[in-house]
């Protein structure tokens, strides 16, 4: 009896762990990234956002909602040491601090995967929601109730996917933040003209990695019914989703 095939819509190098679980359950995994992230056609706004975060003129939050956003920041950064420069703004030095002596910049991350991506570049994190890794989860546990209590306006820099909802932006604005939303990347059908890989997503495969399919072959298999299912991840709920 031939094992039922399951398509993982990721590149094989990052699909190894899931492939192992599928094989343990009697499935034959294959992988193809049907969608890819790429930088927007105009990256200057993202460069300006990173420059503002690195040298804030007042109290500022940098809100990072995905590891792909970290990759986008790295792609437009002026130097390979951009992470160290950004992290320096988090420290109460003579250059980067508020009148109260606090760091001018604080960094918020949506979840542990984003925290790890930032740490790869030497950027520490000041806030990550403990319960739900989403915009709603960030807002529910947000550490400041009155961001402008000291009288100084508080900026919130939010680099996100072009497809991201305005939940975090709207929620922070309602709380009194001066919010700047910038498109960090677009999601397009593979292959992208300028593919953007998240930190840690290398191209080398391991013995556990599933068989790699080209995008055209994967789409044809989906259309023909050759696959038992395909596995994706709903963007908002961040939970596995099986579809026949």
Image (spheres, rainbow, N blue to C red):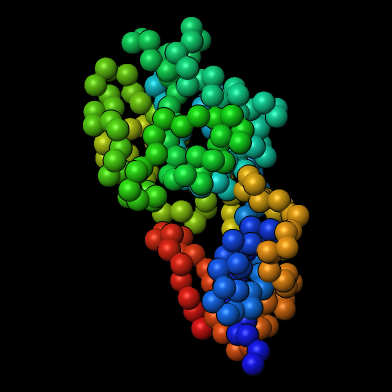
- Count of numbered circles on the image: 0
Residue at 24% over, 28% down: 146
Left or right of 169 on screen, residue 115: right
Query: Image quadrant of residue 49?
Result: top right
User: Can you name the residue that lies furthest to the bottom here?
Assistant: 1
- Nearer to me, 161 or 228: 228
Query: Image quadrant of residue 72?
Result: top right
Residue at 54% over, 24% down: 87
Residue at 45% over, 13% down: 92
- Can residue 46 be seen here? The reply is no
User: Can you name the residue that lies furthest to the front here?
Assistant: 24
User: Can you name the residue that lies furthest to the top here?
Assistant: 94
Q: Where 231 falls versus 48 (above or below)?
A: below
Residue 214, image x, y percentages: 74, 72
Left or right of 164 on screen, residue 31: right
Residue 114, image x, y percentages: 51, 43
Residue at 63% over, 85% down: 3
Residue 96, image x, y percentages: 48, 14
- Nearer to me, 191 or 118: 118
- Can residue 28 be seen here? The reply is yes
Q: Where 26 falls versus 178 (above or below)?
A: below
- Nearer to me, 183 or 200: 200
Q: Where 243 falls versus 170 (above or below)?
A: below
Query: Image quadrant of residue 107?
Result: top left
Dividing the image into 4 quarters, which one contains the N terminus?
Answer: bottom right
Residue 128, image x, y percentages: 39, 39
């Amino acid at each position: 009896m031939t094992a039922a095939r399951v398509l993982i819509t990721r590149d094989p190098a990052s699909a190894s762990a899931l492939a192992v679980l599928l094989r343990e359950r009697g499935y034959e995994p294959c992988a193809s990234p049907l969608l890819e992230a790429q930088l927007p056609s105009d990256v200057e706004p993202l460069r300006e956002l990173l420059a503002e975060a690195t040298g804030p003129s007042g109290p500022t939050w940098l809100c990072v909602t995905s590891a792909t956003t970290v990759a986008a920041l790295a792609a437009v950064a002026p130097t390979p040491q951009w992470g160290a420069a950004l992290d320096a703004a988090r420290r109460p030095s003579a250059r980067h601090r508020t009148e109260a002596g606090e760091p001018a910049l604080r960094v918020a991350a949506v979840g542990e995967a984003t925290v790890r991506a930032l740490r790869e570049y030497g950027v520490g994190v000041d806030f990550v929601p403990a319960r739900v890794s989403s915009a709603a989860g960030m807002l529910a546990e947000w550490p400041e109730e009155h961001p402008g209590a000291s009288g100084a306006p508080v900026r919130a820099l939010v680099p996100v996917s072009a497809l991201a909802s305005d939940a975090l932006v709207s929620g922070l604005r309602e709380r009194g933040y001066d919010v700047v939303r910038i498109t960090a990347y677009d999601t397009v059908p593979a292959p992208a003209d300028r593919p953007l890989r998240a930190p840690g997503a290398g191209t080398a495969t391991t013995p556990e990695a599933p068989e790699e399919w080209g995008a055209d072959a994967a789409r044809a298999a989906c259309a023909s019914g050759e696959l038992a299912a395909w596995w994706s991840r709903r963007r908002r709920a961040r939970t596995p989703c099986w579809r026949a």
